[in-house]
Amino acid sequence: MSNPIKILLAEDEPALGQIVKESLETRNFEVILCKDGTEAYQSYLEKRPKLLVLDVMMPKKDGFTLAEEIRKRDVDVPIIFLTAKSQTKDVVQGFHLGGNDYLKKPFSMEELIVRIHALLIRSQKQSKDNISLGKYTFNYTKQLLVFGDDQQNLTHKEAELLYHLIEKKNDVLDRSEILKKFWGDDDFFNARSMDVFITKLRKKLKKDENVQIINLRGLGYKLIC
């Protein structure tokens, strides 16, 4: 089974929040359940979920305000609004503030899951083609690293490593896990080979001093941006 996809769910109704959380967890999602907008924003910063499901009417910070703040930091993460509101102006406001979809309460779990999957597929396809990394742009599909007018071609393994580092940005990319995935074994010789590829990536990213790949001895690597 693949690793669970991390979703942040902000819902102030405890019963509904728990039902949605448990339903999503049975479908291989990892759900971070928050009871208000302030808690949700902090959890977003710390956990970096792949998708957000936000109730519009919440205490401390409503879903629209939360989405607006998140969009200032991240223009790509998919956002689904949950709301009892149905007026056209509310729907328009939700999309204007960066929402990708809008689900009216009461809703069926199957409909929510279908919409989540559709947004995740669309997001993954878009993200691989044009990934911002500091002052660089990384095109995973074309294996290109772009800095201004300068383009650098990456090997297949360099592109794979960089993509996985970006997925774990500001978090640890486990050394043993990535060795087994791309080299088949985490023995000494494969580890030395991966170190060479990491060194090559560092050189290709050196034009932006705010982008760094740090070696955490015994653990793995961390891409800081």
Image (cartoon, helix red, strand yellow):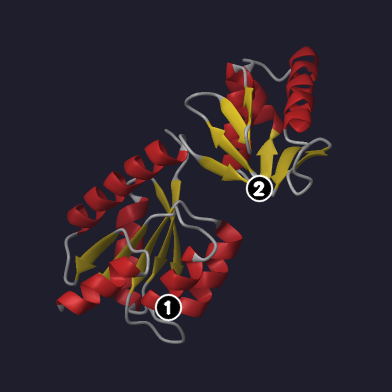
Please give the label number shown on residue 225.
none
Q: Nearer the viewer, residue 126 or 9?
A: 126
Pointer 2 local density, CA inside 10 Å: few below 14, some 14–19, many at least 20 = some
Q: Residue type at mark 1?
A: Thr
Mark 2 vs mark 1, foreground winner is 2
Q: Which residue is mark 2?
A: 134
- Residue sitting at x 46%, y 34%: 129
Please identify the quarter of the rendering in which residue 156 is found.
Answer: top right
Q: Say which of 3 and 87 sits in front.
A: 87
- Residue 90 appears anywhere in the view: yes
Relative vertical location of residue 119 with respect to residue 15 in this rendering, above or below: above
- Tell me where residue 12 appears, x and y as whole percent: 37, 79
Q: Which residue is mark 1?
A: 65
User: What residue do we see at 37% from left, 82% from top?
Assistant: 58
Mark 1 neighbour class, 10 Å CA radius: few under 14, some 14 to 19, many 20 or more? some
Q: What residue is drawn where x is 59% and y is 34%?
A: 164
Tell whether 95 sits left or right of 51.
left
Percent x, y of residue 127: 45, 41
| Residues at marks 2 and 1, CA–CA distance in whole angstroms | 26 Å
**Amino acid at circle 2:** Gly
